[in-house]
Image (spheres, rainbow, N blue to C red):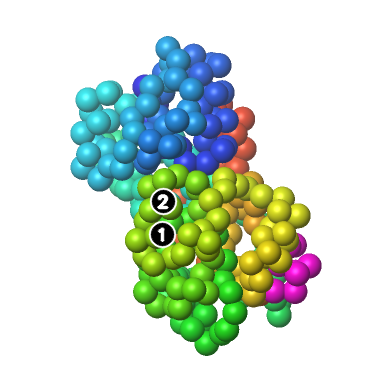
Amino acid sequence: MIGLFSGTSEGRKIIMELDKKNLRTLVFTATGYGSSLVSTSKNIKINSGPLSKDQIKKVFKEREIKKILDATHPYAENISRNLIDVSEELDLPYYRYERKEYKIEKNKNTEIFSNYDEIIEHLKKTKGNVMLTIGSRNLKRFTLELEVERLYIRILPLPSLIQDALDFGVSLKNIIGMQGPFSREVNKALIKSFNIKYLVTKNSGEEGGIKEKIEAAEERGIKIIILDKPKVDYPNKYESINKIIESVK
């Protein structure tokens, strides 16, 4: 059985292809929402919820996982590092699907930082509204360090995430519950509607909507602040879904 860790739209495409080829796969998702996006079948089963490295090893042994396929988000570096360690410790082949990198040119409207601390320190020196499009996991750090009334949060419209934002002091009128990725026009409309001066995002590749965010920011004449991709030394990396499927098969 294949153990596939999914967290992207491409991951779901890989699952569909594995199913078509009758390859038995146990799909690991970190959340119930993620599992709701996966269609089960006689070949596809789901394990939902976050797992530690030891828990991953336990499930792998119980379910007789023979190959690891990592199709997690480019910024989910901790789970990828755990999977690489597990592949070595259990002597299992590891395959990584990695989105093709989107090249970003640093200019007067674009700033690239290596971590959130640098981004927060930079924003402390600025004025104007900030739109965060980085998910919810690191939201608390921004609400503790910056004036919360400046922050506009674009997150998935899940009640639990919206409640978290409210608990961190974000006003309901500053919460944008939408599922992306978004077109350039939608990004432009949001920037204009909320008078945004700084857009904070990740370089999640073209599939993640980074191109449309950059274009919208440039057209509206605002600053876009980008968290650089984490540096992970992935073994056995592929940028083609067809090629990784053939290799796993």
What residue is shown at x 43% (from left), y 56% (from top)? Answer: 136
Question: What kind of element bears circle 2?
Answer: helix
Q: Do we see residue 243 in this rendering?
A: no
Farthest-out residue, bottom:
125
User: Which circle marks residue 70 in the picture?
Assistant: none
Name the spot of residue 10 as percent of width and height, x first.
57, 37
Q: Is residue 15 above or below residue 136?
A: above
Q: Which residues are magenta?
A: 212-222
Report the number of discs: 2
Q: Amino acid at mark 2?
A: Leu
User: Which circle marks residue 161 in the picture?
Assistant: 2
Magenta stretch: residue 41 in it? no
Q: Is residue 13 above or below residue 210?
A: above
What residue is shown at x 55% (from left), y 16% (from top)? Answer: 20
Say whether marks 1 and 2 touch (CB < 8 Å). Answer: yes
- Residue at numbered disc 1: 165
Name the spot of residue 71 as percent of width and height, x first.
48, 40
Neighbor class of circle 2 (other Cα within 10 Å; few <14, some 14-19, many 20+) is some
Name the spot of residue 125 as percent of width and height, x first.
52, 87
Instruction: Answer with left or right where residue 31 lies relative to residue 105.
Output: left
Name the spot of residue 4 as percent of width and height, x first.
42, 32
What residue is shown at x 56% (from left), y 85% (from top)? Answer: 126
Q: Amino acid at mark 1?
A: Ala
